[in-house]
């Protein structure tokens, strides 16, 4: 029987009232995960960006567009993926009201405070693979800061009972990299990781 999104919808409603850290005070709204309730792959980003905060959906800004292009290039159907973030409210700096809101990295306390929502999403979706994009997502999923350059491509799950866990580059790291050659390399590596993960998931479904 297909799983319903009911569990996720209930979590989202509950997260709207979350006061477990101070980020709810400044963001427009909570941005919970979205996607298939029977997804075999959960992709975790860092936190909502400006667009996500305004629209209330994850990965709808420039980084999301980059991720979707990479998923397409890797042959991963977006309909089979659940997208979420380690931290559910947008953290930003702003010089003055009305000025541009600049992304600010969530701290360890905020990542830890928000972690239970990610755990709840994982228990409802029950994926085969969790892919953490960037160090913040990796810290939330693994409980430590991963070194993406040396740990990508390896299954980092510590137990056979848990979903496989991989880390890779966050699309923002590609977009913000001033060295276009390096940015292209990171994009290729993200696509390669997505291809490898999808091959692994497809093999278990045969
Ligand atoms: S960022 Fe997470 S822990 Fe903090 S208020 Fe929002 S939902 Fe709660």
Image (cartoon, rainbow, N blue to C red):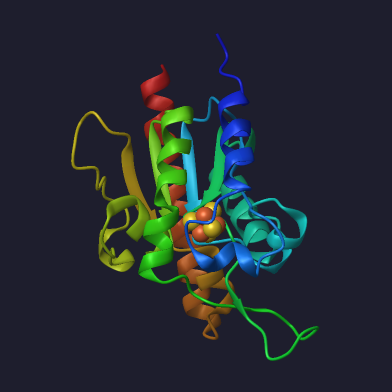
Residue drawn at x 54%, y 77% as measured from the top left: 104
Side of 139 where 188 appears, left or right: right
Count of numbered circles on the image? 0
Percent coordinates x, y for residue 135 in the rendering: 38, 65
Out of 195 and 56, give the one closest to the viewer: 56
In the rendered image, the vertical position of residue 192 relative to residue 75, given as above or below: below
Residue 102 shows up from this direction: yes
Quarter where residue 149 is shown = bottom left
In the rendered image, the vertical position of residue 80 relative to residue 166, given as above or below: above
Residue drawn at x 48%, y 74% as measured from the top left: 105
Q: Which residue, as the protein is rendered here, is positioned at the far top?
A: 1
Residue drawn at x 74%, y 83% as measured from the top left: 100
Percent coordinates x, y for residue 46 in the rendering: 49, 61
Side of 39 where 120 appears, left or right: left
Out of 95 and 66, give the one closest to the viewer: 95
In the rendered image, the vertical position of residue 102 relative to residue 31, given as above or below: below
Out of 118 and 39, give the one closest to the viewer: 118
Percent coordinates x, y for residue 35 in the rendering: 62, 36
Residue 168 shows up from this direction: no
Side of 169 where 3 appears, left or right: right
Q: Which quadrant would the C terminus be assigned to in this image?
A: top left
Q: Which residue, as the protein is rendered here, is positioned at the far right?
A: 98
Percent coordinates x, y for residue 127 in the rendering: 42, 31
Side of 166 where 27 appears, left or right: right
Q: Which quadrant would the N terminus be assigned to in this image?
A: top right
């Amino acid at each position: 029987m297909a799983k319903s999104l009911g569990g996720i919808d209930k979590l989202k409603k509950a997260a709207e009232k979350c006061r477990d850290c101070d980020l709810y005070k400044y963001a427009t709204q909570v941005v919970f995960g979205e996607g298939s309730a029977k997804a075999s792959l959960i992709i975790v980003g860092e936190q909502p960006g400006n667009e996500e905060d305004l629209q209330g959906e994850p990965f709808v800004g420039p980084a999301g567009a980059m991720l979707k292009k990479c998923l397409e290039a890797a042959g991963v159907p977006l309909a089979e993926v659940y997208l979420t973030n380690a931290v559910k409210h947008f953290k930003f700096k702003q010089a003055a009201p009305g000025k541009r809101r600049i992304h600010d990295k969530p701290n360890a306390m905020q990542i830890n405070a928000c972690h239970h929502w990610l755990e709840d999403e994982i228990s409802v979706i029950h994926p085969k693979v969790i892919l953490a994009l960037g160090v913040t997502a990796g810290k939330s999923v693994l409980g430590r800061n991963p070194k993406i350059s040396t740990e990508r491509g390896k299954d980092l799950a510590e137990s056979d009972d848990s979903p496989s866990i991989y880390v890779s580059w966050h699309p923002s790291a590609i977009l913000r990299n001033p060295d276009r050659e390096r940015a292209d390399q990171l994009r290729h590596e993200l696509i390669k990781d997505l291809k490898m993960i999808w091959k692994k998931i497809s093999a278990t479904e045969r």
